[in-house]
Image (cartoon, rainbow, N blue to C red):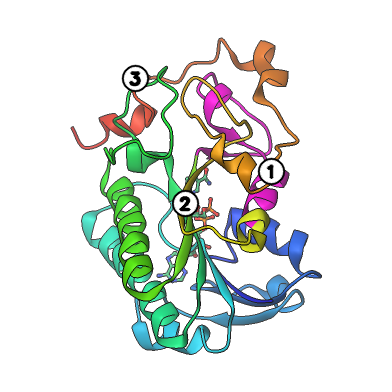
Amino acid sequence: MKVLVTGAAGHIGKNLVKAIHQDYELVLTDIKQDEELDKLGLFQQADLAVLEEVLQLAKGVDAIVHLGGIATESTYEQINRNNFNGTYHIYEAARKHGIKRIVFASSNHAVGFQPINQSIGPDASHLPDTYYGSSKAFGENLANMYNKKHGIETASLRIGSYLEKPSEHRNLNTWISVRDMNQLIVRCLEAEQIGTSVFYGVSSLHNDYFDNRDAAKIGYDPEDNPEDYREEIENVKMENVTDYIGGMFTNFGR
Ligand SMILES: NC(=O)c1ccc[n+]([C@@H]2O[C@H](COP(=O)([O-])OP(=O)(O)OC[C@H]3O[C@@H](n4cnc5c(N)ncnc54)[C@H](O)[C@@H]3O)[C@@H](O)[C@H]2O)c1
């Protein structure tokens, strides 16, 4: 399978590429040049905000893992350019080149104003907490539209907190380890059918924030568990802690 990975020079991208480069033919891209990636696949520097560049990248690929974009809150202009437009360009490239599978790095911030302690499932309404979170909700909506109109399947991964190890109380519910993230993305690439699925990118199948049991249906079986770190982190609370899933993001810009 030939897979285009956007944001390949980023945290998640780089670790993913190192883990899967022998199993897939990879086309790797990022706006940043990255010499290490050259050895792991065909690296092409490109800007997701430029449609022609994205169309060029996607020629002849079977699936796209779309990780590229601004990965936190920023100005509307930056989010619009890199996330809204970048994700739209990915879907247009998939449509034009007949690519039928996308794994989209969405975020818990697409549902950031959902309350904690209700174990929300994949059907929870979008309640973004930032422009960033809005761009992820938009990406999930594009996924639905391009599925209905053009038969493109997407797994939207509402990623929690991707870290080597959990470091604060919130991570008891939001943490995803490097190897679980890699596993979840591979399961999404390999699943026979995904339609437009939403999975939570966390190292658990059920916790106080998320009901992620649908992910088990495509074989996701997390190897890590934030509970193993409870003693270390349960008393570490960030300032501006809130009762919403998005944590401190719900206070940005107020
Ligand atoms: N890390 C997390 O905890 C987390 C949580 C939720 C969602 N996500 C999402 O997962 C994805 C990857 O996250 P990450 O932690 O690896 O972030 P990252 O910032 O390390 O990687 C994102 C990459 O996208 C690239 N990029 C940005 N704008 C671009 C453009 N216009 N054209 C081409 N490349 C561009 C950046 O250069 C960067 O290398 C992001 O979409 C992020 O929103 C991450």
Q: CA distance from mark 1 to mark 3?
A: 27 Å
Q: Which residue is painted at 36% across and 55% down in the image?
A: 140
Residue 26's spot in the image, x, y percent?
A: 68, 76
Q: CA distance from mark 3 to mark 2?
A: 28 Å
Q: Are marks 3 and 2 in contact (CB under 8 Å)?
A: no
Q: Label 2 is placed on what type of residue?
A: Ser
Q: Which residue is painted at 67% across and 39% down in the image?
A: 177
For marks 1 and 3, the one nearer the N-term is 1
Residue 244's spot in the image, x, y percent?
A: 34, 24
User: In the image, 73: left or right of 200?
Assistant: left
Q: Circle 2 sits on which residue?
A: 197
Question: Is residue 126 placed above or below 210 in the rendered structure?
Answer: below
Q: Which residue is painted at 69% across and 43% down in the image?
A: 180
Is 123 in the magenta?
A: no
For marks 3 and 2, the one nearer the N-term is 2
Q: Are marks 1 and 3 in contact (CB under 8 Å)?
A: no
Indicate which disc residue 180 carries.
Answer: 1
Q: Nearer the viewer, mark 2 or mark 1?
A: 2
Asked which secondary structure carries label 2, the reply is strand
Residue 90's spot in the image, x, y percent?
A: 41, 73
Indicate which disc residue 242 carries.
Answer: 3
Instruction: Please give the count of numbered marks on the rendered protein.
Output: 3
Q: Label 3 is placed on what type of residue?
A: Thr
Residue 55's spot in the image, x, y percent?
A: 43, 86
Q: Quadrant of the N terminus?
A: bottom right
Asked which secondary structure carries label 3, the reply is loop
Q: Which residues are magenta?
A: 160-185
